[in-house]
Every structure is written in structure tokens, then in C-alpha cells.
């Protein structure tokens, strides 16, 4: 979007409202935060904010999936996880209060799909569990526990028994979860 | 040239299909341009249809194949599009030629079977028929076009617009596919462009007002589709850029076409309607924005949510919800009771009940007295006793007693309604109930709370997730082997016994203390010290402080799962509070009885006093008794209603005091316990021998469940006392307001998030259920006192009546016409009321049983759907596997065949490795070279259904082939059934069917 422009054009704003689950205030707030990040960026005319800058946001700072989130929502050709304002809005929209379960689960799946191959296989799951248990040794699961855990997960959610969890299986599992929608949220 | 491409890349099948097909097209077109010149427009639509159908066919077949890369596809599409545009019109001419050619081939191929010939002949026949029909249609169209040209220019411009849009549409549709398979989208775009071209024609006609209904329908559908797209676009997982483009184009399309949809006069109206709709949408959106802006403390709560996760935020959301309810209760009591009385009622000091008695006057303004709601506070609109029993007050003739009564009833009714409705809504949201079949998956996929923005919280969360994983694994292991069930059972029984003892003990203690304080009150509080005066509050607070800890210790005996343990804990604390509350209420009832006995005495004394008064003053003039006594000097009854409002003693209002002392203890513990602790820990940490931050004292957690319970009980008190003290909702509002800010601040500055994960969404209805129980329990005594005790004789709006609800009857008699009262009295006849109650019970029973059945049916359907889903998936998987196997075998067979047999015709016996592969080969060869064999193969096709769906048996293949362009069709099919098809086979295919 328009570089340093501190104000969003009105028609664009209304279009963003149509296209996201955000309210006007939220979009404006997002724009403010984004322009702040941009100002700190080198040069006022770059429309993207690098991943490192995005990750300084307190909302993402302690999220174990921060990098994945940036990569999933980034439309950058360089695959560097940098976000344009529109990508940023996409992110906030998917994580907003009123986003549908469908879109949330879709993005959750892509976030968890570490190797971007369209399915969650055992390696993805291992990475996922490791992200969830944190990096320190005392919280990490032992190899045996990990094996058992992954086999249990696959047993539950791998309906077609092909050794991986695909998107529809994932959504099936997620849609029954009582608190996915309430926890898959990021607010500015 | 299609051939060599095919040969070149066998790995990426679908792309090559596209390209090959396109090239073939172009070949045809070039030829056509050279050869033929007439009948250009004739078959445009048919060609389109054809192509659409064929593409659908191809794409369906291709859908099972590998997804292709975007780049290649785009290239293919571009080509396709170009051809499509430039040669659409000529396209069908070559068709004719082709048909002729096919016929020639048929003639030439003497050995081809009769069946095949027949089929082809039939096909040509039907095509001819179609041609004729289309000619008719075209004629009509031409007429329309002529008309239009004659008529006016606007139509033309419109047409132009329309031509532009479809192109855009095409582009748009091109961009869309990312989730759907490329081939599908291609066919879609084809059909799209096709329908657009049709729509274009339609549009031109439509302007003239002579649209055929079918075409109109199509256009409408297209517009509706766009509209739907616009509304659902935010739910699509596409990047914003694409969404923007699509949105703009769709909006443009809708804008352009929508207006044209209406006819003649209706059009203007329609356009107006559309405009208004747009305005309305905008208004709605603005309203939504406004509404979210109006929600109080939204940002505060979100901030907390992002620091501490959703469980802590759930408390604040609950608090806000309570605040909303109290706001409405306050509005009712304040607007309909307190303000009218203050404005229109008799002023202070005009009568005994509105005046501070003489003996209290001296201390009436003391702060300590006011603090206890004695003195002037007691004799004000804040309490029941101040209200006069005058039927109508002020120039408005406001029916004060009636209003008072109805507001009391309305408060309770409203509270019930809100709580139950919220519970129902929550239950709806929770839906299908607990499903533990995805325990592990949920733990992995949904356990992270994305709101957590605080590193410390994140660390806690990591730890809690790890423990939950470990627990789940251990549980899973333990569920397989049997634990010592007897020991745990014994321990659980023991724990419950201990808890019961605790509860009984605390209940007795409260009862004892209340009794004692009654005695103190009778003897006069002035003789006792601070402890005696505040004994009840202190005991209750202490109990509330220590018993939960005790329960916590006891619950370690039970060895429950943490979440269940937490629920037990909550339940026990709830029971403790409940016990306290109920002993308190019983004591209160005793006090009421005492007061009423006292009141009787006062009444007798009153008559004596009056007699004395008359005796002393009257003798002078016998007629008019001079009531010159100052109202403060008039003796009065104890007014138990105000006392209930103030519970025990004349000078204290117990409810308010309870609330306030409760609040004070909360804040003091908060200040001392949390803030000072935090400060100490933070600053002493540098010069201490162990790490204070993580060691023993640490920081305190925010106790969500305890706070929620406190809130709920506080609300119970309010409900109980609201009837006798109209000020209570206002007071509660104040309290909630203060605690909102104070606790927000406290949480943010001196709490750490709890380690124990308490899922917010699951517990919401648990809170609500407790609130409902409390609501019931607290309204019960209030209703009981209203119904069964006569009101005090000299205070309150109902004084002088036998019962409080008599005010209704009085209103009926005096303010309503006579017949109404009669009807009411008939209706309230027990003979009518009892059957009505019975009916209600029956209705409830019926509704409940039906809802139960629905639930069961729902569950069953869900289960069915689930199993069906799983079965389908399994089946598909199986079928795909089988098909893959067959393909593999077919390929093997093909290789073998190409190696061994030089004659293609005799392969039926030679390559008999596998049934299916064999048939495939036979069928294929048969169709292409030896039709008789194909028939043979068809008849010997094994009845395997799965092969039918995933791979096409020869029979259906020959049929579908008959309706399509033979060259490409054969091509695609061939590719489909033999992915790595041998060079020779391809050569054969094209050698036979291509025009070269």
C-alpha cells in the first residue's frame, strides 16, 4: 500500500472492511501499528516489513509459531516472511474474533504444515509438538513419549490411514474442538 | 506436433494434454480458414457447449491425476484463451468438415463394426437436428440484433460494456484456482466465458425488454453468484491482493448487470432497491462498528487477554456481563422507584417514617453510623421503610406502591430470563457435547493460546502443555492396566467425608455466630467491642479464606484429573458459600420473627401512647385532636423490611455492609497480599539468598475461579436484598465498576498468570449454572417473606395492608373497570389455576422429551455422517489404490506387449498377466483399431465397481467418445488410461484420427 501514507483512502478502507473480519477501528489501528513498524524500516518507501520487525510485536513475540505465521501470510516472492500491509490485514483477519472456523482451521493447518507439502506427516507433528513444549530440556518430551504421542494423534485423526493428516481430516478434528476458535486469536 | 510434445514429456500429463489439444485446435482452425468461408456465426454457441462438455469430461477425469504447476497451466490457458477468442466463430465450420471426414473414414474402414457405424450415424443425425434448431434460434437472434440496431445507441454501448466484462471475468476466474485443481478451474472459466458470451447476447436483448426467461434466469444467476461471492469473500483463504481484484470486478459486474435485470417500469424501482440495499449495508456496517466501539472496557480486556490468555479474560468478560445486568436492574429501581419517590413523594421530615427518631438524631450524621447505613441513610429513599403507602403520588398520580411491587418482581423475572437465555445460548454454542475421541489431536492442534503475548505466560503455557501431554500419555498407558481401584475409591470417599465435615462445621459456626450477634443486638451493641460487632463478617470472611485452602489439601487425596479436580473444588467452595448463605438466611428469618414480635408490642404501646397523648392534650377542645407532635418523637415499629435490608440491628444494613466488607477484604488482601508482595519480591530479590521470583514467595496468581465465585455470591446478595433496599443495585454497580478498574490494574501490575489451565469456554456455563442456583436460592427467601409475612404497620409502601401483593388487587379494583377485576378473580380461582399449572407442567415435560429426542437424533445423525465419511474416505482410498495398481499393471502389460507382439491385433491372448490391465489394453486397441475386439472385451469386463468409477471401462469410453471431437478425446482418454503410453500407441491414435 501507499508507503508512508498515514491515512488510508476511504474507499480502500471500506473495501478492507468487506474483505476482512475486522472492524473499521481495528483496521485503522492495524494501519497505525504497521506504519510505525514501517517507519523504523529502512527507507519510507518500502511497502513491506521484514519478518524480524513483525516479530517484535508483543502479540507475536512469544508465539512459538511466529515464523510460520509470517511465512504463511507473506506474499513476498523472496520467501523471506516479510509482510505487506495487506498481508498483515489478512493475518489479523484470520486471527480475529469473528473469523469463521473454516478460515481459521485452514490457516492453522498451513501454519502447522512446516514443510509446506499439504499434509501433516510425522515430522510435521514432531516439530509441532516440539514448538508447543518449548525449547528447554526439562519441558521437552522424550523420544519414547514423542513416538507414542504421534502415533496416538495419527490414530485419532488420520481417518484414511495414510500416515498423514490432510486438510479435511484436520478440519474435521478441529471443528469438534470446543476451544479452538476462542484460542486461535490475536488481538492488537 | 502434438505428437512430439506428447512423447517429449510423459511425466506431466495434464499440461501436455492441454497443449496438445490447443495445438490441435489451432491446426484445425488454420485449415478451416483456408478452406471454408460461409456460415460463420452459426454454431458459435453449440461449439461452446460442446467444448464445455468436453472440458468438463476431461477435467473430471484429470481431477484424480496429479496437480500441475501453475506456470505451465497459465501458459496453456493463455494459448487456449487466444484460440478461443480468435477462432471461436470459425470453430464450428471445421466441425462439419470433420464430420464429413469421419464419415469418410468410416467408409474407408471397411472392417469397422456395424455397431460403431450406427452410433456414429446416430450422432450425426442428432447433430444435424441440433443444427437446425440452432439455425432457428440464430434467426431469432438476428432479428433481435437488427431491432436493436434500429432502435437506439445505448443498447450498443451496453453491449460493449458487457463484452468487456466477460473478459475480465475470465481473467479473474483464471486467477482463482489455488485450492481447486487447475483443470477444474479451466473448465469453469470456459463455461464462464461461454455463459458470458451468452449473457452478452442476452444483455443486448434484455435492454429491449424481450429477454427469454431462460436467459434472464442465467443472468440473474450470474449476478447472484457474484453477490454471493462478495459476501463470502472474506471467508476465503486467499491473499488480499487477489481478494481485492475479485471484489472490485465482482462489484463492477453486479453494478452493471443488476440495473438491467428489471424490465421497463420495474427497472427504476429495482435500481432504487439496489441502491437502498447498498446504503442499508453500509449503515449496518457502521452500526456494527459503532456497537463494537460502545462495548466498555473492550481494549482493557483485550490487553489482559493478550497477556494472560483467555481464562483470565473470561473473568473480566463475566464481570462486564454482570455489570450490564446490574445496570439494567439499577435503571429499573432508580427510574421507577427511587426517583419518583424523591421527586414526588412527601419530603423528608413530613412524617414519622421519613424522619430520624429523636434518640438517634444526635448520631445520625456520624460517619460510622452512615457507613453502616444508619442515621440519615436509613431514613432515605435507599431503604424500604422510607416509602409512603400513599396510593398515588405527585401530579402524575404515580402509583408508588404498585410500581415498587412490580419493579421488585420485574427485577427477579428479568434476572431469571437473562441467565437462562445466556445459558441456552452457551449450550447452543457448545453444541454436540463432549467428544473425547480426539483427545491427543486437540491437545496438539488447539492447546496453544495465540493470545498469549507475555514471555512469562508463554513459559507457563509451555510447561502446562508439556505436563498435559505427559499426563495424557500416562493416562493412556494407565487406562490399559488396572490401577488399585479400591484404594482410590476409599480415598475419594474419605476426602468427601472430610469436606462434608468441614462444611457442616463451618455452617454450624456461622449459625452460632449469627445467634450470638442477635443476642448482642438485643442487649445493645454499644456495650460490646469491635470484635463483637463485626463477628459475623469476620467469621464469614475467614471461613471463605481458609476453607478453600483446606479443600485444596483434601482434594490431593482424591487423585482426580486436574480439570475434574478443579470442578470439584469449585463445587465445594460453592457449597461452603451456599451453606454460609443459608445459615445466614435462617438466622435472618429468626431475626424477622423477633422483630415481628417486637412490632406487636410496639403496636400495643402505640395505642397506649396515643391514648396518653389524647388524654394529655384533648380535654380543651373535644373535636379536633391536635397532632402537633414532631414526627421524630412518634414511637414506631421496628420495620423488619428495612431490617432485612440492613439485616440485623437498627443501625446496620447487613447486605450492604457484607458487600462492602467483602470488597474491603478483597482489596486489602489484594493490596497487601499482591502488591506489597510483588514489591518486596521484586526489590529484595537482588539481595536475598534464594531467588524470590521463582522460589518460595514468588508472585501471586490471579485466582479466576475464586473471583468468579465471589462475584456470583455477591450478586446473590443483591438479588436477595434488592426488594427491601432499592439502593443495592446501584451500590453493586459501583462496586463492579471499581473492581473492574482495580482488578485490571492489579492483574496487569502484580499478578502472574496461573499455571493451572482453566479452559474458559468450557467453564462458562458452569459459572452460569452456579449463578442460576444462587439466583434461585436468593430469591426464594425474598419471595417467601413477601408472600407469607404481613408488612410492617408503619413503614414502607405496603403498610396497612394484610399482604404485600394486595397492592395488585387494590389496583385491579380501583384503577380498572369492574369486569376486569371479575375476570381476574375468576382466573385466579384455584379451580382454574391448578389445571393451568398442570398444563404447564405437561407442556414442559413434552418439550423436554421432544428436545431429548431431537438431541438423540442429532447425535445419531452426526455419528452416521461421521461413519459415512470415514467409509467413503476408506473406499476412495481403496479405489485409488486399486486404480493405481491397475495402471501399473497395464503399463507393465503395455511394455510387454510392445516388446513381444508386433501385431497389435493379437495381443488379447499374448498379454494375459492381469485381468484389468488386459482389458484396458484390449479395449483400447479394440476401439482404435479393431472395434470387434473392443466389443468382445467389453463383454468380458469383470464386474468390479471400483474400477468403474476411477478408471473408465471401455464401454463407456466408446460412448463418450462418440459425442466429442474424436482426435482430442481419444487423445485424452488414451493419456488417461496409459500414463506413460508408448510412442507407438500415440502414433497409432493420431495416425488414425488426426486429419493430417
Image (tube, grey):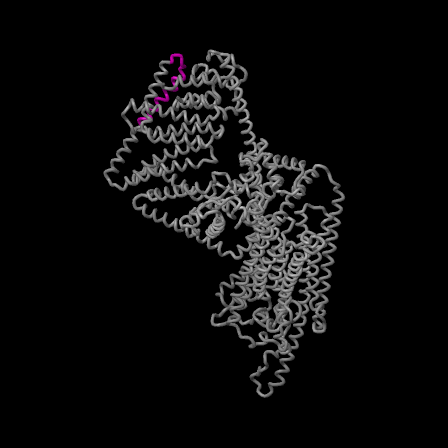
Task: Give the total number of marks visible in the rendering.
Answer: 0
Viewport quadrant of the N terminus of chain B = top left
Classify B383 as above or below A19. Answer: below
Classify B10 as above or below A56. Answer: above
Image-based side of B845 in relation to B928, left or right: right
Q: Which residue is outermost to the left?
A: B150
Q: Position of residue A94 (x, y in %)?
A: 51, 44
Nearest to the observer: residue B747 or residue B856: B747
Q: Quadrant of residue B732?
A: bottom right
Q: Quadrant of residue B702?
A: bottom right
Image point (46%, 13%), residue name? B904
Residue B247 visible to the viewer: yes
Q: Would residue A27 be counted in the magenta stretch?
A: no
Residue A26 visible to the viewer: no
Q: Which residue is outermost to the front?
A: A42
Nearest to the observer: residue A173 or residue A92: A92
Q: Position of residue A29 (x, y in %)?
A: 48, 52
Image point (35%, 25%), residue name? B26
Q: Position of residue A177 (x, y in %)?
A: 58, 43
Q: Which residue is outermost to the bottom?
A: B620
Nearest to the observer: residue B675 or residue B102: B675
Magenta span: predominant SS is helix
Classify B217 as above or below B627. Answer: above
Q: Quadrant of residue B681?
A: bottom right
Q: Position of residue B186 (x, y in %)?
A: 42, 32
Image point (39%, 26%), residue name? B22
Nearest to the observer: residue B873 or residue A141: A141
Viewport quadrant of the C terminus of chain B = top left
Segment tinted magenta in the rendering:
B109-132
Q: Would residue B121 be counted in the magenta stretch?
A: yes
Amino acid at each position: 500500500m501507499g508507503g508512508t501514507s498515514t491515512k488510508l483512502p476511504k474507499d480502500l478502507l471500506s473495501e478492507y472492511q468487506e474483505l476482512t473480519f475486522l472492524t473499521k477501528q481495528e483496521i485503522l489501528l492495524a494501519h497505525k501499528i504497521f506504519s510505525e513498524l514501517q517507519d523504523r524500516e529502512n527507507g519510507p518507501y518500502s511497502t513491506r516489513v521484514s519478518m524480524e520487525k513483525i516479530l517484535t510485536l508483543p502479540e507475536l513475540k512469544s508465539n512459538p509459531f511466529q515464523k510460520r505465521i509470517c511465512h504463511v501470510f507473506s506474499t513476498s516472492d523472496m520467501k523471506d516472511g516479510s509482510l505487506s500491509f495487506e498481508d498483515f490485514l489478512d493475518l489479523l483477519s484470520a486471527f480475529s474474533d469473528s473469523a469463521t472456523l473454516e478460515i481459521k482451521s485452514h490457516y492453522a493447518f498451513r501454519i502447522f504444515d512446516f514443510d509446506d507439502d499439504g499434509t501433516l506427516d510425522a515430522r510435521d507433528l514432531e516439530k509441532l509438538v516440539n514448538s508447543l513444549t518449548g525449547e528447554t530440556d526439562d519441558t521437552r518430551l522424550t523420544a519414547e513419549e514423542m513416538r507414542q504421542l504421534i502415533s496416538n494423534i495419527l490414530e485419532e485423526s488420520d481417518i484414511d490411514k495414510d500416515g498423514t493428516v490432510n486438510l479435511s481430516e484436520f478440519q474435521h478434528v478441529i471443528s469438534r474442538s470446543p476451544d479452538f476458535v476462542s484460542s486461535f486469536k490475536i488481538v492488537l | 506436433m502434438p505428437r512430439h510434445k506428447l512423447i517429449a514429456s510423459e511425466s506431466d500429463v495434464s499440461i501436455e494434454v492441454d497443449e496438445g489439444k490447443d495445438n490441435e485446435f489451432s491446426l484445425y482452425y488454420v485449415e478451416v480458414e483456408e478452406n471454408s468461408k460461409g456460415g460463420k456465426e452459426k454454431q458459435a454457441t453449440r461449439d461452446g457447449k460442446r467444448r464445455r462438455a468436453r472440458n468438463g469430461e476431461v477435467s473430471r477425469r484429470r481431477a484424480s491425476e496429479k496437480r500441475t504447476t501453475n506456470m505451465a497451466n497459465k501458459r496453456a490457458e493463455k494459448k487456449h484463451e487466444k484460440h478461443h477468442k480468435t477462432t471461436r466463430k470459425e470453430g464450428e465450420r471445421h466441425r462439419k468438415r470433420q464430420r464429413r471426414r469421419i464419415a469418410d473414414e468410416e467408409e474407408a474402414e471397411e472392417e469397422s463394426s456395424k455397431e460403431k457405424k450406427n452410433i456414429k450415424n446416430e450422432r450425426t443425425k442428432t447433430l444435424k437436428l441440433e443444427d437446425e434448431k440452432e439455425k432457428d434460434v440464430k434467426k431469432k437472434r438476428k432479428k433481435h440484433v437488427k431491432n436493436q440496431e434500429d432502435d437506439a445507441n445505448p443498447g450498443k454501448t451496453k453491449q460493449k460494456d458487457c463484452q468487456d466484462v466477460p473478459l475480465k471475468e475470465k481473467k479473474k476466474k483464471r486467477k482463482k484456482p489455488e485450492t481447486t485443481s487447475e483443470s477444474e478451474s479451466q473448465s469453469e472459466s470456459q463455461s464462464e466465458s461461454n455463459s458470458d458470451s451468452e449473457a452478452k447476447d442476452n444483455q443486448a436483448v434484455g435492454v429491449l425488454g424481450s429477454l427469454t426467461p431462460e436467459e434472464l434466469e442465467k443472468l440473474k444467476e450470474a449476478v447472484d453468484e457474484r453477490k454471493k461471492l462478495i459476501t463470502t469473500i472474506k471467508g476465503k483463504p486467499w491473499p488480499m491482493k487477489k481478494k481485492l481484484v475479485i471484489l472490485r470486478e465482482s462489484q463492477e459486474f453486479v453494478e452493471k448487470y443488476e440495473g438491467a435485470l428489471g424490465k421497463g417500469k420495474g427497472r427504476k424501482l429495482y435500481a432504487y432497491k439496489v441502491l437502498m440495499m447498498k446504503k442499508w449495508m453500509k449503515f449496518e456496517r457502521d452500526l456494527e462498528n459503532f456497537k463494537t466501539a460502545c462495548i466498555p472496557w473492550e481494549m482493557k480486556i483485550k490487553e489482559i487477554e493478550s497477556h494472560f490468555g483467555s481464562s483470565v479474560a473470561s473473568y473480566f468478560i463475566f464481570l462486564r456481563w454482570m455489570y450490564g445486568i446490574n445496570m439494567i436492574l439499577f435503571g429499573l429501581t432508580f427510574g421507577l422507584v427511587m426517583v419518583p419517590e424523591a421527586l414526588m413523594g412527601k419530603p423528608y421530615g413530613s412524617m414519622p417514617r421519613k424522619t430520624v427518631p429523636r434518640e438517634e438524631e444526635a448520631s445520625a450524621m456520624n460517619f460510622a453510623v452512615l457507613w453502616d447505613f444508619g442515621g440519615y441513610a436509613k431514613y432515605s429513599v435507599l431503604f424500604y421503610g422510607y416509602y409512603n403507602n400513599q396510593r398515588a403520588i405527585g401530579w402524575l398520580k404515580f402509583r408508588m406502591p404498585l410500581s415498587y411491587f412490580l419493579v421488585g418482581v420485574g427485577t427477579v423475572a428479568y434476572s431469571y430470563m437473562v441467565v437462562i437465555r445466556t445459558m441456552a445460548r452457551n449450550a447452543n454454542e457448545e453444541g454436540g457435547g463432549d467428544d473425547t475421541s480426539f483427545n491427543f489431536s486437540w491437545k496438539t492442534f488447539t492447546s496453544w493460546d495465540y493470545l498469549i503475548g507475555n514471555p512469562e505466560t508463554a513459559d507457563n503455557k509451555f510447561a502446562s502443555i508439556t505436563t498435559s501431554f505427559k499426563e495424557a500419555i500416562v493416562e493412556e498407558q494407565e487406562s490399559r492396566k488396572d490401577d488399585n481401584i479400591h484404594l482410590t475409591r476409599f480415598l475419594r470417599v474419605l476426602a468427601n467425608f472430610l469436606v462434608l465435615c468441614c462444611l457442616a462445621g463451618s455452617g454450624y459456626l456461622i449459625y452460632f455466630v449469627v445467634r450470638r450477634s442477635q443476642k448482642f443486638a438485643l442487649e445493645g451493641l454499644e456495650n460490646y467491642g469491635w470484635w463483637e460487632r463485626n463477628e459475623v463478617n469476620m467469621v464469614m470472611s475467614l471461613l471463605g479464606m481458609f476453607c478453600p485452602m483446606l479443600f485444596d489439601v483434601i482434594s490431593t487425596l482424591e487423585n482426580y484429573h486436574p480439570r475434574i479436580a478443579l470442578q470439584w473444588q469449585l463445587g465445594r467452595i460453592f457449597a461452603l458459600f451456599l451453606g454460609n448463605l443459608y445459615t445466614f438466611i435462617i438466622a435472618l428469618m429468626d431475626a424477622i420473627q423477633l422483630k415481628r414480635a417486637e412490632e406487636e408490642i410496639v403496636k400495643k404501646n402505640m395505642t397506649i401512647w396515643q391514648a396518653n397523648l389524647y388524654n394529655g392534650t384533648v380535654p380543651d377542645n373535644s373535636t379536633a385532636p391536635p397532632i402537633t407532635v414532631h414526627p421524630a418523637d412518634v414511637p414506631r415499629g421496628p420495620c423488619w423490611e428495612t431490617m432485612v435490608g440492613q439485616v440485623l440491628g437498627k443501625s446496620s444494613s447487613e447486605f450492604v455492609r457484607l458487600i462492602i466488607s467483602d470488597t474491603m477484604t478483597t482489596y486489602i488482601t489484594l493490596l497487601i497480599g499482591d502488591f506489597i508482595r510483588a514489591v518486596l519480591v521484586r526489590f529484595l530479590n537482588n539481595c536475598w539468598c534464594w531467588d524470590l521470583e521463582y522460589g518460595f514467595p514468588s508472585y501471586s496468581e490471579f485466582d479466576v475461579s475464586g473471583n468468579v465465585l465471589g462475584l456470583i455470591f455477591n450478586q446473590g446478595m443483591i438479588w436477595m436484598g434488592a426488594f427491601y433496599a432499592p439502593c443495592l443495585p446501584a451500590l453493586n454497580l459501583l462496586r463492579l465498576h471499581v473492581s473492574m478498574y482495580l482488578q485490571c490494574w492489579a492483574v496487569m501490575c502484580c499478578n502472574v498468570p496461573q499455571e493451572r489451565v482453566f479452559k474458559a469456554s468450557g467453564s462458562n456455563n458452569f459459572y452460569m449454572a452456579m449463578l442460576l442456583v444462587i439466583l434461585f436460592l436468593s430469591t426464594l427467601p425474598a419471595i417467601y417473606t413477601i408472600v407469607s409475612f404481613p408488612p410492617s404497620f408503619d413503614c414502607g409502601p405496603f403498610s396497612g395492608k394484610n399482604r404485600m401483593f394486595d397492592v395488585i388487587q387494590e389496583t385491579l379494583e380501583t384503577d380498572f373497570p369492574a369486569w376486569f377485576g371479575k375476570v381476574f378473580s375468576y382466573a385466579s380461582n384455584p379451580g382454574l389455576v391448578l389445571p393451568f399449572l398442570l398444563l404447564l407442567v405437561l407442556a414442559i415435560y413434552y418439550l423436554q422429551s421432544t428436545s431429548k429426542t431431537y438431541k438423540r437424533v442429532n447425535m445419531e445423525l452426526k455419528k452416521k455422517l461421521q461413519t459415512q465419511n470415514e467409509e467413503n474416505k476408506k473406499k476412495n482410498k481403496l479405489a485409488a489404490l486399486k486404480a493405481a495398481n491397475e495402471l501399473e499393471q497395464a503399463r507393465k502389460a503395455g511394455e510387454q506387449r510392445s516388446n513381444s507382439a508386433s501385431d497389435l491385433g493379437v495381443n488379447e491372448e499374448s498379454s494375459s498377466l492381469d485381468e484389468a490391465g488386459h482389458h484396458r489394453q484390449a479395449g483400447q486397441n479394440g476401439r482404435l483399431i479393431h472395434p470387434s475386439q473392443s466389443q468382445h472385451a467389453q463383454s468380458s469386463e469383470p464386474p468390479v465397481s471400483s474400477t468403474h468409477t476411477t478408471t473408465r471401462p471401455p464401454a463407456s469410453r466408446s460412448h463418450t467418445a462418440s459425442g466429442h471431437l474424436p482426435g482430442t478425446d481419444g487423445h485424452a482418454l488414451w493419456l488417461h488410461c496409459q500414463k506413460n503410453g508408448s510412442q507407438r500407441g500415440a502414433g497409432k491414435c493420431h495416425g488414425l484420427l488426426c486429419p493430417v
